[in-house]
Image: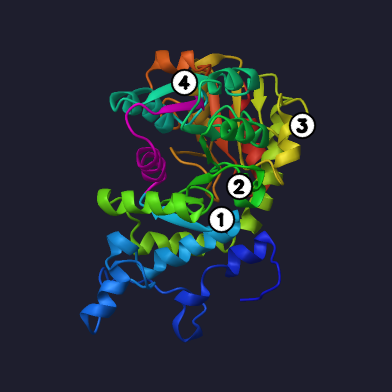
Amino acid sequence: MSTLPLHPATLAVRAGEDDYRPHAALAVPIEFGIAHGYPDVDSWEQVARGEVAGPLYARNSAHPTSLALEAKLAALEGAAAAVSFGSGMAAISSTLMALLKPGARVVAGKDTYGGSHYLLQHTLPQWGVQVTLCDTTDAAAFDAALAGGCELLYLESPTNPMLKVQDIRRLAAAGHAAGAVVVIDNTFATPVNQNPLALGADLVLHSATKFLGGHADAMGGIVCGSQALTDRIRHYREIHGACLDPMSAFLILRGIKTLALRMRQHNDNALALAQWLQQQPAVAQVNYPGLPDHPQHAIAREQMQGFGGVLSFELAGGFAAVRRLLPRCQLLIRAATLGTVDTLLGVPSTTSHVECTEQERIALGIPGGLVRCSVGIEDIRDIIADLQQALAE
């Protein structure tokens, strides 16, 4: 590949693949083989000890298709290395468990994805890890929580499903001053719109199932960061086995080739829809960082190159209005995922916070009338027309 500095759209198409395309093929092949043979014990042991790069056993070193995906994501995030997993939650849970031990302390915002929130609230405390949750956008609360020292600072920006934005540069500096490894979930933004490592984070997480793959046909997760930290996480994956399968790796790789194109349309459509929703009498609140009246709009403009393809809106009529709206949509799809080329609608009780009780969702400030919309790449006029007829009395 070129030695010239390349832009994200080019990296999405070309990065990480050259070593894994035999005979100059234009696509990385799907390598289904789980093990590779060696001619003698010496060369075999060199690979097993990590002295020489090469495939060994798919759970240990991953298969070539996943290695190409890891190399591509590392390039897009400006990381030294990356580790792939069978799902986004596998990436999150493995990262936390690989870096923490009983007695460690974690600081995080309250507005994390429901699965992450469950890990922070229930799983980690069962293993003797102390977790302090702060108001997500209250920098002073984070400063106070970090003052006593901390092993890991967990961030998510924008958040799911309230689209709150955290000041990554400021919080990363505060986390490092407290001795913490700074980890951020970058799923909503994608590396096209935001690069947390450049803002001071140590590790970046993605649910590759979402925008990276983009077509709702492959599940995966990935962690990007320094060689030292990703080596620890890779070893945890080796022992606990949450590796990515070759077919999903291939589909995600193929999806990333159009990531920059898709994100441009996702960004444009989401902003246009957010602006339209603000004018609708039935809509009480629209949450999207691209809107000038979003509480963290200035921070989003500073650290993001685009505002993403997800928004949420609250209906004035509460949950009863949500139950009436969703079945009336003819084009928009009701589904528990996001980041696909289709426009999807969901409610927290079946999507982002299905793991939480109703009381926990209320405590987290998620209103009953909230609808999350993952805005697809269809013609925005058709998206708006469908919502308009569904909202009509």
Instruction: Between residue 233 and residue 281, name the one nearer to us.
Output: 233
User: Residue 8, image x and y in percent?
Assistant: 66, 60
Secondary structure type for disc 2: helix
- CB contact under 8 Å: marks 2 and 1: yes
Mark 4 residue type? Thr
Residue 272 appears in the rendering = no
Indicate whether 374 appears above or below 244: above
Residue at left offset 54%, top offset 31%: 372
Secondary structure type for disc 4: strand
Residue occupied by mark 4: 132
Residue occupied by mark 1: 79
Return the disc, 2 or 4, that comes first in the chain's sequence.
4
Residue occupied by mark 3: 298
Q: Is residue 282 magenta?
A: no
Lateral position of residue 104 relative to residue 110, left or right: left
Mark 1 residue type? Ala
Mark 2 and mark 1: Cα distance apart in space: 7 Å
Label 1: few (<14), some (14–19) or many (≥20) C-alpha neighbours in 10 Å: many
